[in-house]
Structures are given as C-alpha cells and as structure tokens.
Image (cartoon, rainbow, N blue to C red):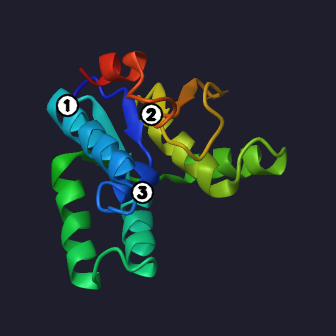
Amino acid sequence: MSGASVGLDTNILVYTVDSQDAGLCRRAQDIVRLAAESDRCVIALQTVGEFYTVVTRRGLQSRDAAAQQARDWVRLFAVVEPKTIDAEDALASAAVGRLSYWDGLLVATLRRAGCTVLLTEDMQDGAVHGGVAIRNPFAGERLPAEIEALLG
C-alpha cells in the first residue's frame, strides 16, 4: 500500500458490529467502506487485538465470529506492527502525561507507517501528537466533510 495517511482506531471497527446504536453503527460502516475503497488507511496490529478483546468481552460477537472478523480486517487493510522505537515513544508520552501508554503506542506505530491523521473518538479531537492529528469521525450529525475528503 502506498500513500497511507489515515489510521483507524479500535472504536471504529467495534462500532461496525455494535448494533445498539444504529446511527453509530452505520457511520462506522461507512467509514470502513470509504477507508477500504481509498486504499489510504492502515490499522495497527494493536487495533486488531483490541477489536477481538472488546467485542468478545461485550458479547457483541462469539469468539469464532470475532476472530474471523479480525482476520477480515487484516486482509482488508494494511497492518503495521509496533517496533521498539514505538514503545520508547509511547513510554515518553506516558511519562509526561500526554497520552496513555497504549494510545501513545498506537500513535507512534501509525506515525511510523506514514499516517498523519488518526480517526478515533477516544482522544481529544483536533489534538496533534508527533505530527498525527486526532479526528473524531463521530462528532456532529454526519461524517465531517474533512474526514470524508480524507477517505474519498
């Protein structure tokens, strides 16, 4: 994959299978569809594991279904694995209170993969960490135009 610039966080993938809020589920599915069509998105290996853990713990999918969906995410998107340098960056961010270790690891891993934007609702919308802008695709009544353009 060339030109990856957008990372997807776990919550987006989880919402695609969580039908408790139909609007949120539809928006997450739209984001994933646009992301897959754009070939500009990447997910971290951490996100794949978190997806499996969250959906099975919440009872959203059986273990078998969650494992199959996680395999589908791996086939659908380029996946980047963390390296030691990413862990060092995450520890530095956590030590000064900028991000939790796990959020710092995600941001560092995606940054190394060339991402300049992370789509998530779990961090402060508009914040920038090491050159990676945090954008909440669930803010507002519809998918923000800026995010739609990034994925389009």
Q: Based on the displayed image, in which of its 4 quarters is residue 33 positioned?
A: top left
Q: Residue at x 32, y 61 (%)?
A: 19
Residue designated by label 2: 137
Image depth: mark 2 or mark 1 in front? 2
In space, the residues marked 2 and 1 are separated at their CA atoms by: 18 Å
Residue 39, which numbered label? Answer: 1
Q: Could you tell me which secondary element the residue under label 3 belongs to?
A: helix
Badge 1, how many Cα within 10 Å: few under 14, some, many 20+? some
List the single residue furthest toward the right: 96
**Contact flag, marks 2 and 1 (Cβ < 8 Å):** no
Q: Mark 3 highlights which residue?
A: 47
Residue type at mark 2: give it: Pro
Outermost residue, bottom side: 63
| Left or right position of 144 against 71 | right
Mark in the foreground, 3 or 2: 2
Seen at 55% across and 53% down, the residue is 84
Q: Amino acid at mark 3?
A: Thr
Q: Is residue 103 above or below residue 126?
A: below
Which comes sooner in the sequence, label 2 or label 1? 1
Question: Going by the image, does 20 lie left or right of 90?
Answer: left
Give the quarter of the figure containing the C terminus.
top left
Q: Residues within 10 Å of mark 2 (few under 14, many from 20)?
A: many
Q: Depth check: 140 or 16 in front?
A: 140
- The disc placed on residue 145 is none
The reply to whether the C-beta atoms of the residues labelled 3 and 2 are less than 8 Å apart is no
Amino acid at pointer 1 = Asp
Left/right of residue 94 with respect to residue 119 in the rendered view: right
The percent position of residue 57, horizontal first and vertical second, equals: 45, 80
Compute the Cα span from label 3 to label 2: 17 Å
